[in-house]
Amino acid sequence: MALDAVRKKIDEIDGRIIRLIAERQVLAGDMARLKFRDGIPIRDPGQREHVLERAFERAVETKVDPVSVQKIFGILVEMSEERQQECMGDGNLP
């Protein structure tokens, strides 16, 4: 396969990743409304730890660098928390 073809495939994957992140952010907004309704705080250290552990384990299973994957998921959790804060009127997102 030519270099340009590989780059094109990677670009397509990157697009899918971004669409999945956008979908995750929509769900974070849904989560904010549910948490607000039920009086649950945005930050849940236990859930955060669960997400990071699960990401680590899945990365190990698929032979991807688990430390890097865990860092990426840490960023995703932070983005989710920021979106939830914004939905509750406490954030600084557009």
Image (cartoon, rainbow, N blue to C red):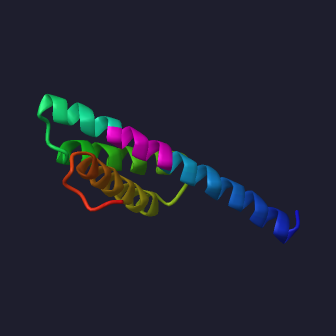
- Side (left or right) of 3 relative to 16: right
What residue is at 41 percent from the left and 46 percent from the top?
Answer: 25
Residue 79 at what x, y percent from top left?
35, 56
Point out residue 29 in the picture as x, y percentages from the top left corner: 33, 41
- The reply to whether the magenta stretch includes residue 79 is no
Q: Quadrant of residue 44?
A: top left
- Report the residue that reaches farthest toward the left: 39
Residue 91: x and y in percent read 24, 57
In the rendered image of this protein, does residue 28 appear above or below residue 77? above
Q: Is residue 26 magenta?
A: yes
Quadrant assignment, res 32: top left
Relative to 49, residue 34 above or below:
above
Q: Which residues are magenta?
A: 22-29
Q: Is residue 42 left or right of residue 59?
A: left
Q: Quadrant of the N terminus?
A: bottom right
| Lateral position of residue 72 relative to residue 30, left or right | right
